[in-house]
Image (cartoon, grey):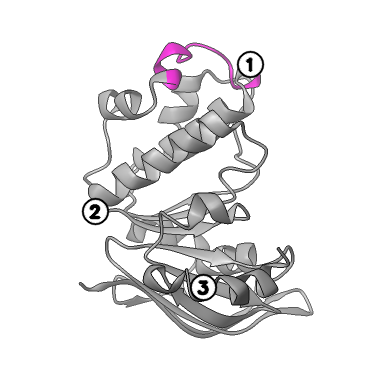
Amino acid sequence: MSLAIDINNLNAWYGESHILHGVNLSVHEGEVVTLLGRNGAGRTSTLRAILGLTGKRSGSIKIYDQETINMDTYTIPRLGVGYCPEERGIFSTLSTEENLMLPPVVKPGGLGLDEIYNMFPNLFERRNSPGMRLSGGEQQMLAMARILRTGAKLLLLDEITEGLAPVIVQKLGQVVRDLREKGYTIILVEQNFRFAAPLADRHYVIEHGQVVETVLSSELAQKTELLNSYLGV
């Protein structure tokens, strides 16, 4: 498998604040990996740095073999990168379908509306409802569905289960599995380790803006205690 993303010695700053200190990680096409760690460890900042949203960056970020460290932020999604931020960014006065159709297509091969509605039946039922009327779970589904239309194949998903009911969390887990079967590459920032553990090929533990541990799915049982110590469980 070829690499979808390869990050080496990534440093990033918010203004004068040095937030990432030499992050190293790589993800092959079709893999699902998680970024684990306590709040403030640098997980979300890693996703934002990939997209050039942190300000100054140094090191190397290759996306599908193309160096992006000096690339303008608006050009990075055109390589096939989709970002689902924690705050979701749903436009409250637009309908579900208008929200869904808003982002531009950046690559061929995105999912059509019928495919998206088949994956998210709730969105089909609420397709004419304004964003402000959607539940938290429906808004999260919409935030994920919106990037699937664009043709992005590398998905950066930030805390997609936060504050959601167990039945919605279960549904999102199935969506991640389905996307993996379709060949998508997924980097998942997740606080809910029970949700993330069975989905991922590999887990990167981030602490103080660095990757401090890499745990394969096959190593979870023997490294549970180590992970608990990092995550404060």
Residue bounds of the magenta highlight: 122-133
| Residue ID at (45%, 79%) | 25
- Give the quadrant of residue 200: bottom left
- In this rendering, which labeled residue sits more in front, label 1 or label 3? 3
Residue assigned mark 3? 204
Name the N-terminal-most of marks 2 and 3.
2
Disc 3 secondary structure class: strand
Please name whichever residue, 18 or 118, is drawn nearer the observer in this view of the structure.
Answer: 118
The label on residue 183 is 2
Residue 164 higher or lower than 213, as above or below: above
Spatial separation of the CA atoms under disc 1 and disc 2: 33 Å
Q: What x and y, as percent, mark residue 155?
A: 41, 54
Spatial separation of the CA atoms under disc 2 and disc 3: 21 Å
Residue neighbourhood size for the residue with mark 2, other residues' Cα within 10 Å, grouped as few (<14), some (14–19), many (≥20): few
Reply yes or no: does residue 127 show up in magenta: yes
- Does the CB distance between marks 1 and 3 fall below 8 Å? no
Disc 2 secondary structure class: loop
Instruction: Name the quarter where the N terminus is drawn.
Output: bottom left
- Does the CB distance between marks 2 and 3 fall below 8 Å? no
Q: Is residue 212 left or right of residue 76?
A: right
Residue assigned mark 1? 133
Q: Is residue 133 left or right of residue 141?
A: right
Spatial separation of the CA atoms under disc 1 and disc 3: 36 Å
Please name whichever residue, 70 or 57, is drawn nearer the observer in this view of the structure.
Answer: 57
Amino acid type, residue under disc 2 in the picture? Gly
Q: Count the labels in the image.
A: 3
Amino acid type, residue under disc 1 in the picture? Arg
Residue neighbourhood size for the residue with mark 1, other residues' Cα within 10 Å, grouped as few (<14), some (14–19), many (≥20): some
